[in-house]
Amino acid sequence: MRKSSSIQVTKSFLPPMEEYVKLLQSAWHSSQLTNGGSLLLQLMEALKAYLNVPQVLVTANGTLSLQIAIKALKLRGEVITTPFSYIATSAAIAWQGCKPVFVDIEEDHCCIDAGKIEEAITPGTTAILATHVFGNPCNVEKIEEIAIRHGLKVIYDGAHCFGVNYLGQSVFNYGNISICSFHATKLFHTAEGGCLITPDEKLLEKIMWLHNLGHNGPEDFHGLGINGKASELHAAMGLAVLPHVKSLVESRKQRAEIYDGLLQPGLQKIQLRKGTDWNYGYYPVLFDTEAKMLEIKGALNEEQIFPRRYFYPALNKVEYLRGPEMPIAEDVASRILCLPLYHDLGTEDIERITSIINKIV
Ligand SMILES: Cc1ncc(COP(=O)(O)O)c(C=O)c1O
């Protein structure tokens, strides 16, 4: 079998360099590299229009965006969250001095099981922080109903959700605050970056000063803040990537369909929630057992192909977060593998990957 250069689970899309450099010229002319420069303002306007959301604040990364969201909503005590997410989700809760309280996931959609949330609510609960796993929306209707009934805030970790619509509108329009990650490995990226989205104008104002060290002008402060600002260099990358996003989604969709056609039928996949217009951010597959998944991963690695155990481990198993057993999340985390998926992944490569998998399955 042909051996070629290594294939990673994802690959950053780089816009034509001249498009990036052209955008940088405005920063060079103004000598303004950060603190709300014109490229950043341009990017935020462009994102607002692209995503069709009321307002967007671009920040330094998705993790800080989560921390700022928790701070802005003054969360304390217990925050109900999912054990099946990237470490940043729970780490942000713990970093802000709150306690992550895990609720198991739905096996089909892999998002927090909204039907189990109420059992976990105590007098100390202040919020629900749920992840739209791989861009698959949570049961947002049920979560909203529970939150209203119990007076809880809702934050959505939409790190994977760039451009995802649910029931005809941006999935970022749900909850008190949603965040997204613009990390280099994401569909839309600014190398490092993220954003906060909220329909609440007053909350946005607060988030603005929170992410800018509390500044109220140069010599006055609203209160305690942190530095979560994005630079002009990052904004320029975002402006250079954004015009390509539609074709990136299309090219991922084509590749996902090739996988669908070549992989043995019957493999367990994550079900998209009905009404979702997806972004093809990931290609996760669940194998029958952890042993089978590890065998497949090992065989692919031998061919210099590096899928990722994403997410693994279940977060209730992480030492500093340790929580009670979460049977479904632990089971899913032990068997899942995200296969390589990116804009210019070759058909030949997908054929190679699927034939290795099919032989073992
Ligand atoms: C679900 C989830 N939440 C949060 C983050 C954190 O985003 P960032 O890397 O931009 O800090 C990530 C990053 O991969 C993620 O996958």
Image: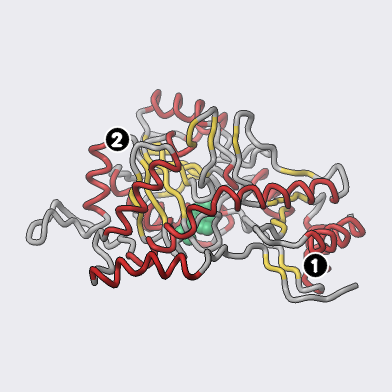
> Which callout, 1 or 2, points at the residue further toward the start of the chain?
2
Decide which of 237, 165 is in the foreground and name it: 237
Q: Secondary structure at mark 1?
A: helix
Q: Amino acid at mark 1?
A: Leu
In screen coordinates, is 271 left or right of 168?
right
The residue drawn where x is 90% and y is 59% is 360
> Can residue 125 be seen at all in this image of the molecule?
no
Q: Which residue is mark 2?
A: 200
Decide which of 159, 254 is in the foreground and name it: 254
Direction left: furthest residue:
219
Q: Name the image quarter holding the N terminus.
A: bottom right
Q: Which residue is mark 1?
A: 300
Q: Secondary structure at mark 2?
A: loop
In screen coordinates, is 94 left or right of 3?
left
In screen coordinates, is 123 left or right of 259?
left
Counting from the top left corner in percent of width and height, residue 297 is at 78, 64
In screen coordinates, is 2 left or right of 157?
right
**Mark 2 surroundings: few (<14), some (14-19) or many (≥20) residues within 10 A:** few
Counting from the top left corner in percent of width and height, residue 241 is at 49, 58
The residue drawn where x is 41% and y is 35% is 175
Q: In whole angstroms, how far apart are the C-alphas of marks 1 and 2?
A: 47 Å
Q: Amino acid at mark 2?
A: Asp
Beta carbon of the mark 2 residue lies under 8 A of ligand 1 = no
Counting from the top left corner in percent of width and height, residue 323 is at 54, 50
Q: Name the image quarter holding the C terminus.
A: bottom right
**Mark 1 surroundings: few (<14), some (14-19) or many (≥20) residues within 10 A:** many
Question: Where residue 275 is drawn, which disc sits there?
Answer: none
